[in-house]
Image (tube, grey):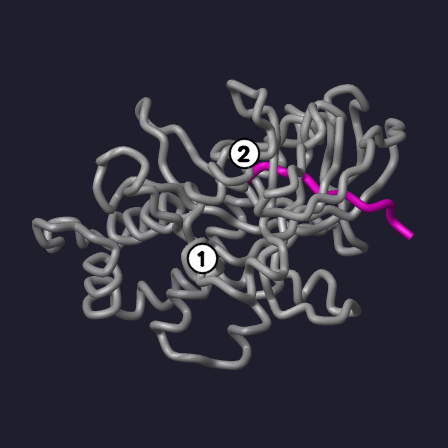
Amino acid sequence: MYFSRVRIRPNIFKSSQLGRVLEGNVYGIHRLLWDLFPDEKQRTFLYREEIAREQLSALPAVRGEPIYYLVSQTKPIETDDSLFNVDSKDYQPQLETGQRFTFECRANPVVTRLGKKHDVVMDAQRQLLKLLVKELNLETELPAKQEKSAYKRLLLEKGGEAFSQRLTEILKINPLYAERLQQGGQLSDHLEWALKACVDRTLEKWFVNQGERLGFKLVADSNNLSKLQNSAYQWHGLSAKGGKGDKAGFSSVDFTGELQITDMEKFKEALFTGIGRSKAFGCGLLLIRRCG
């Protein structure tokens, strides 16, 4: 296996509009990186996009161009006329069961419901809103078009004191949001916090499930809370890929935290083959660093 750092050649990046063309174009990036593996008929690499200014700020002339980290079965080929500069090294991490690592992972969390896959974040929010509407006996007052905004509006307008108390119950059991609750805030703020708390809990459950399958577990802190954070939820459109319209695409979430290996062979496979779905479009690569 190989671990590579790939950057667009500085002379090309500075003298063209390529950076703007590639911005948000996950399908285009996927195709360009595949050109580094001309003999591969099927994709065998994982990658993650970062911003060079954040990753290589100590180097001169770094202006925020994209940088890509790749894990691949074969070594990327950098030709004389290549779009990219490629730095590669052998990737054979020395692993033992019980080792702890800090990690970063951009993933596409999905949940299967009635045979159909759903975005975990959107699904968690919708399920909580539906539950609150049901608990407060407001289902008959929902409009025909039951979008998330309609649920929110109905709860805020007609939920009353019972709704306020229910949000308080939800927030009090979460240490982070219980602290916010003490600082006040309007009812609409409490609803948004409750939705975020629900998403955090659901994403943690999703990541824990991945670990059970892939040979690792999350490390807990002194308060017995998992060392896991999520951020940068984003929707990536893929309308250029195949005529499904604006709804075609996937979401991604950035996870950071600390994990411990429970099964060395399964964990090594996770490093090489990734976590979750949408691996062809920059998701799934697990970046690790030894603790301490």
Local secondary structure at mark 1: loop
Separation of disc 1 and disc 2 at Cα?
18 Å
| Count of marks, rendered view | 2
Which percent across, then down, holds residue 80?
A: 65, 41
Local secondary structure at mark 2: loop
Split into 4 quadrants, where in the image is the N terminus?
top right
Q: Is residue 286 magenta-colored?
A: yes
- Using the image as rendered, state which of residue 49 and residue 273 is in the foreground: 49
Which percent across, then down, holds residue 264?
A: 81, 23
Neighbor class of circle 2 (other Cα within 10 Å; few <14, some 14-19, many 20+) is some
- Using the image as rendered, state which of residue 125 and residue 63 is in the foreground: 63
Q: Is residue 126 magenta-colored?
A: no
| Farthest-out residue, left | 144
- Using the image as rendered, state which of residue 23 and residue 147 is in the foreground: 23
Q: Quadrant of residue 78?
A: top right
The residue tagged 2 is 35
Which percent across, then down, holds residue 221?
A: 78, 53
Sequence-wise first label, 1 or 2:
1
The residue tagged 1 is 23
Look at 47% across and 34% down and name the residue there.
278
Give the magenta part as a residue range: 283-292
- Using the image as rendered, state which of residue 271 and residue 29 is in the foreground: 29
Look at 78% across and 19% down and name the residue there.
265
Look at 58% across and 54% down and name the residue there.
230
Q: Amino acid at mark 1?
A: Glu
Q: Quadrant of residue 86?
A: top right
179 relative to 223, above or below:
below
Q: Which mark is residue 56?
A: none
Q: Amino acid at mark 2?
A: Asp
- Using residue 259 as the reference point, say whether residue 124 is left or right of it: left
Which percent across, then down, holds residue 68?
A: 63, 48
